[in-house]
Structure formats: C-alpha cells, structure tokens
Image (cartoon, rainbow, N blue to C red):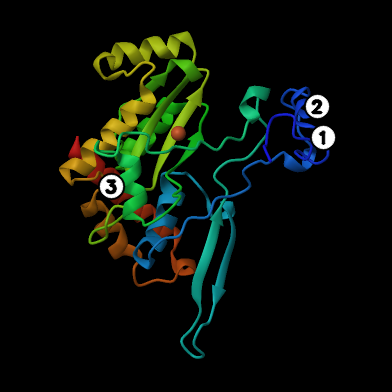
Amino acid sequence: MSLDASDSRCYFGLGFNQYRGLGMERPSFLNFKVDHMTLLVQPEMYNVSYIVFRTIFGCSPEHMLYEKRKEWVAGEGEKSLTFAMQTGHGAESKSELENTMIAVVQPSEPAKMQSHVREMLNQHRAAAHWQHIALRTPDLLSFHRHATELGVNFITPVLRDDSEDVIQVFTGEWFFPGSPPSGMFFEYLQRNPSEELLKKLSDRNRESWFNDKTFLGLYGEKEEEYRRGKVTPFLDFELFEELHALVKDKNLWEITEADIKSAEKKMRAYAAKRV
Ligand SMILES: [Fe+2]
C-alpha cells in the first residue's frame, strides 16, 4: 500500500490536499507554544546554575516559579529537586515574533568527513539530543555587553543571518571542571535588527561577519573546538570554581541575597581582569 499525498487517512479525517488547502492553519489543539524546557544538571552545577539565572539572566527571587524539595532518607534533611525560573514574559509586539520553532539537524556529511552533529550524537550514545536553546531579546547588544561583563564566554561574535533577518550569538557549553563537555549551549538572538544597528555592528566587527553562512559558521566553530579537544565552557573553570565554592555547602533555599551579590562581584572582577 502506498502512502501518497492523497491518502485520506491523514490529518484527522481531513484529506491531505484538503488540509494543505488551509495554508498554515492547523487545529488549535496542535498549536504548540514552548511552555518550559527542562535541563538536567549534575549536583555541582545545580546551585551555580541558580547564580547564573539570578545574575546573567537577571532573575529576581520572585521569578523562581517553583522549587521542590524532598527528604529521601529520614533524618537527613530535605534536598532541592528542581526549580523553575521565569526568564521572560509578556505579549509580542509583532505577530511574526509569535512563532514557536523546533529546528531539526542531521549529520549530512559523508561518513568519512568530520561532523560535529554526528560526534555529539555518538558521544551521548543518543538517537536524538537537544543541542541549544535560542532565547530572543529585543536588544542583543545590551545583553551581550551585560553577559560579557559577568564572564560569559561566547564562541562566536555577533553574527547576522540575512536569510532569516536575525542577529545571533552563541555561548560556550554548560559543563564544569572534571566533566566532559555537555554539548548544551545557548543562542541569544534578536529578530528584525534595524539598519542602524546593522551598520553599527558591521563597523565594529567587519571581519567576523558570516553573512548568510551563520548556520555553517556555528558548526564549523564547534567542529574546530572538538578537533582541538578544547571546548569553550559557558563560564571559565576558574570562575566556575569561585562560584561553586560560594554555594556548594548550601541547600538551594539557603543561598542568600548577599551570596548573589558576592557572586556577581566575583563575576565582574573575573571578567574585568580578563579583558
Ligand atoms: Fe539556533
């Protein structure tokens, strides 16, 4: 039996052609928005990730939507299991910003050619792997400055993807001393940058623009990192250790505002001496 475009069993009773005729419409129960993402981290990373959300992501204690605890062994006290940070909120100014997208990538290179995507999948012994989460900001340059001043490593300069009318930047991976690179990093992006902003960027950063080649530019960079065996972390190990030392003996809920201030001070000092 062949499955062709006229197969009438598809799409909940609508014939394929009938459905396609509706353009981009789809039933409301198939209108998926990203509600949340869940990131698994090793214990060494848990409290430090809280610091990262409080400082780099600018979350206040009120942005922690929940934090759950459990006492696994009677008498040993509670452990923090999970917390959720609200990293953004509010309606979009333009309807084209209301898209929710999932990008799918395969290792398309010939088997003998090096492929970062293949390497990641094999390394994780996985048929699928979530690679990066792209977070949109209305002002990428301000965010970039803010994050750089707090010690965040970016593996690319601010890039422009003409075909999507987007400027974007990619961070180092989330991992820590003694652990292998996780393969997980963040992208921060801004859509529909103004002519003025593009001019400013190209003046500042002319040689490092990969117009129309952003996608391959990122993968080329990742390939290079893995070939060298030197993967850039989100935060340098030295800084990670400083932050870890600050909070490693605490339960998440015991991290004080003074700890966050002190962490931020360390991050600024570290980043300043690096420049
Ligand atoms: Fe992306």
User: Where does label 2 land, which residue?
Assistant: 18
Q: Dot 2, crowdedness within 10 Å: few (<14), some or many (≥20)?
A: few
Q: Residue at the spot x=42%, y=38% of the render?
A: 106
Gap between marks 3 and 1 measured at Cα: 49 Å
Marks 2 and 1 close (CB-CB < 8 Å): yes
Residue 236 drawn above or below residue 71: above
Q: Quadrant of the N terminus?
A: top right
Q: Quadrant of residue 243?
A: bottom left
Image x and y of residue 181, in percent: 29, 52
Tell me: 133 left or right of 204: right
Q: Residue 222 or 41: which is nearer the viewer?
A: 222
Image x and y of residue 208, in percent: 27, 20
Q: Dot 1, crowdedness within 10 Å: few (<14), some or many (≥20)?
A: few
Q: Which element carries disc 1, helix, strand or loop?
A: loop
Name which residue type carries label 3: Pro
User: Where does label 3 land, which residue?
Assistant: 233
Q: Residue furthest right?
A: 13
Name which residue type carries label 2: Gln
Q: Dot 3, crowdedness within 10 Å: few (<14), some or many (≥20)?
A: many
